[in-house]
Amino acid sequence: MQTINYKMEYSILEYVFGLIGPAIIIAAIFYPIADLKVGTLRLHLPTGVANGILMLIGAYVTYLTVGTLFKKRAANSQGASIVLDEKGLSFTTVKKFAGVLTTVSYDAIDKITITDIPETSTSSAEKTIEISAPSTAFKKFEFDAIHMAKDSDFDALVGALKHRAMNAAFKQI
Amino acid sequence: MGFLHKLFQIVSGKKYRNCPDGAAVDPAAQRALQAGLINSEQILAYCDSYTTGLSHDTLAEGLGSYWGVSSPREAAETLEWLSRYGHRFFYDIVFQVYSDGASGEGRQEVLEALVASGRYGAPEIVRQQIAAQGPCEEKTLVFSALEQAMEMLGNLRSVFRLLEDEVNGSYSPKDYSAGILAWDLGRLVTVARMSLDCKYIEQDEFSRILARVDEELRSNFSSWPQFAKSYIIGRASWGGQNMTLGGIIGIAEDLMADAKSPWVLSPL
């Protein structure tokens, strides 16, 4: 059995973005807006509607940003690792903000796409492994090397899949 | 002029060049020549005769620059190496190490397998020489071999389960475990033909090489597509994935599928 750490880190930027939505909601509550203007077009909205629209936008932004944080938390909830054993691999999938420990048999994997694009002067490196298992609930899942502790973990996962996923067709991008 | 001529041949898509002086008549020799077809198509040599039909300059550059062969002695050494070891010697070792899932880089496992092979001397003595301080010839040879083998292991890791061609489809793990004999046989035929053209080897020696290639072909391969897989895996394990590999796979696909291809006209 082999265990690869697979942990999604939180960035300060995500926390900062997470504050944008609530900030919009607070602003909409404390600063009444008479009307909304788009370019030269004045919408002539009834009183309070403009603030309501802003609050909805704030709620949606909050949902997106805070949702991402909760999804990361869920993804890290079941041990934050990929476990490879003789028959299959186990990892955490996210379902409605909850982490679900998922085990996939190597035989169920029918396609594996490895993306390994080195860093250039204009773009950052991209290293991902997408496994496709049509008979499972998640159908497709992507592992990103950015969430692995070492570069060699990515190579180890690729190597293990190459040796064990006998029914899979491999493709490298 | 030579370059322009070669470029014209590539652009004009001239494939399966027949020798104007006639083809080899012996069926075993023909089969052996066909084992070198991927290579001979790559260098635009005749596909059906002992002579390659290449100019003296091309032969000298091909043998000298790429093979380090510029004398009968060097030709004999290279042909002997291809015949006896080739790249399959390293491949068989690194494939085993890779299949066993060696932890880490696999360097120690490859080194031990090289020593245990006996190619560099009695294993016990070589182990003592490696452990001892100071340089010695065997030690240098083993470590030079280790570097080559590690490069092949890296290439194998990167191409394993990723190779495919239009005729065979994706190559299975079994195809990789079958080895790369075709890669060595194909090159053996081409180097032997070029050496014959340069008069580095005699006709008798050349005939012996073709007979050996034919024997290996019939014992190890049941079809040309099977042979092509072994050749392509060998090429990829030696040179890794690059644009030239794509070109070689293209040549092999044509050989397996073209109605006028010698492989299609004379199945193995």
Image (spheres, coloured by chain):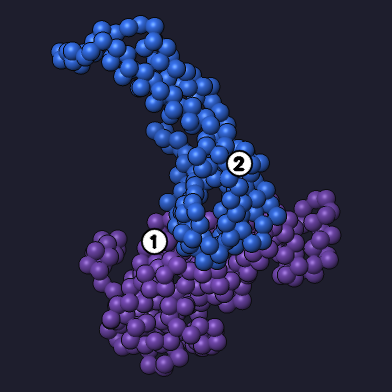
Chain colours: A blue, B purple
From the top left corner, tell me how far across and down residue A123 is, in percent: 41, 35
Q: Position of residue B231 (x, y in %)?
A: 48, 71
Task: Please tell me which residue is depicted at 66% across the width and 61% down the height of the picture.
Answer: A86
**In the image, residue A13 lies at what x, y percent?**
49, 22
Which sits in the foreground, A31 or B92? Answer: A31
Give the camera-side residue of B13 and A9: A9
Q: How many marks?
A: 2
Residue drawn at x 33%, y 77% is B257
**Who is closer to the viewer here, A170 or B261?**
A170
Q: Could you tell me the amino acid type at mark 2?
A: Tyr
Residue type beneath disc 1: Gly
Q: Which residue does the numbered mark 2 point to in the structure image?
A: A6
Image height of A47 relative to B240, above or below: above
Q: Which residue is mark 1?
A: B246
A56 over B225 or under it: above or below: above
Q: Quadrant of residue A8?
A: top right
- Does the rendering let one see residue B179? no
Please tell me whether mark 2 or mark 1 is closer to you in this view.
2
The answer for which chain carries disc 1 is: B
Chain letter belonging to callout 2: A
Q: Residue at 30% across / 82% down in the picture?
A: B19
Residue B5: mark: none
